Image (cartoon, coloured by chain):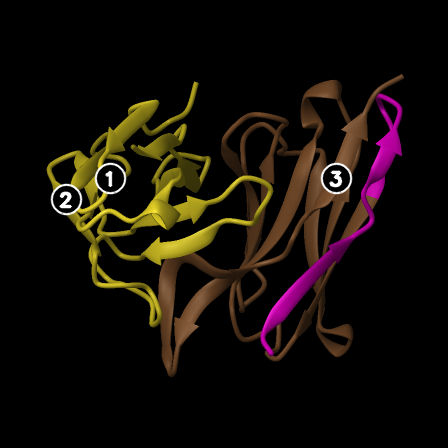
Chain colours: A yellow, B brown
Amino acid sequence: QSALTQPASVSGSPGQSITISCTGTSSDVGGYNYVSWYQQHPGKAPKLMIYEVTNRPSGVPDRFSGSKSGNTASLTISGLQAEDEADYYCSSFTSSTTHVVFGGGTKLTVL
Amino acid sequence: EVQVVESGGGLVQPGGSLRLSCVASGFTVSSNFMSWVRQAPGKGLEWVSVIYTGGSTYYADSVKGRFTISRHDSKNTVYLQVNTLRPDDTAVYYCARGGSEGAYYYYYAMDVWGQGTTVTVSS
């Protein structure tokens, strides 16, 4: 069982917006602004989309945005495009002995 | 081009060992933290280990005492020594760089990933 909880799947139509949640505890998501989001297409390496809750690396479209409230972080994708269909993972620093934890991943389907 | 390339995976019997290598180009491994993340077949990502610029190391509870991360600066390479392997260690092992942009270094986020090396533990 993953330390961070994500929905197994979400879906949306092209042009719509979707939000993926990532729920942890005060020892990880809620306690630190060190949440990251990764996109992974089948058979490919993960790609960093958001770091430190809200920041986008250069080259990541501004359709991708991150936020946090309490122990839950969120990734919002607006103006959905077909190429956004992928698995998305959140991660966070944790003060537990594990140091860094991932969520179980969310499969995004673009209808 | 900034990239990392993993090697060293293979088929190994339970209880066996391997040394995974991660060769970096386009940056120096001593300037960013370097991590290993694994993904079991059909499963999600699992953080494994990190080595920081100062040499501090941390491990997931599931591998603590069995895996060792190290760095060889002159070879610009990071290693993961994996010992006492178990079937549930079967996974693709990714090497990843701690993110940075200009002079800013990201906290606990990885921006450059290799294509992974596959470790299969089976008798």
Residue B113: assigned label: none
Nearer the viewer's eye, disc 3 or disc 1?
3
Q: Quick one: label 2, few (<14), some, or many (20+) residues within 10 Å?
A: some
Kindly identify the residue that appears in the image at 45 percent across and 54 percent down. A47
User: Which of these two is toward me, B54 or B90?
Assistant: B90
Residue A68: assigned label: 2
Asked if the stretch drawn in magenta spans residue A110, the answer is no
What residue span does the magenta drawing correspond to?
B1-18
Mark 1 vs mark 2: which is more N-terminal?
1
Label 2 element class? strand
Kindly identify the residue that appears in the image at 17 percent across and 49 percent down. A78
Let me know if residue A30 appears in the view. Answer: no
Label 1 element class? loop
Residue named by callout 1? A29
**Is residue B73 left or right of A82 when viewed as pictured?**
right
Kindly identify the residue that appears in the image at 33 percent across and 50 percent down. A36
The amino acid beneath tag 2 is Lys
Residue B118: assigned label: 3
The amino acid beneath tag 3 is Thr
User: Which of these two is toward me, A96 or A19?
Assistant: A19
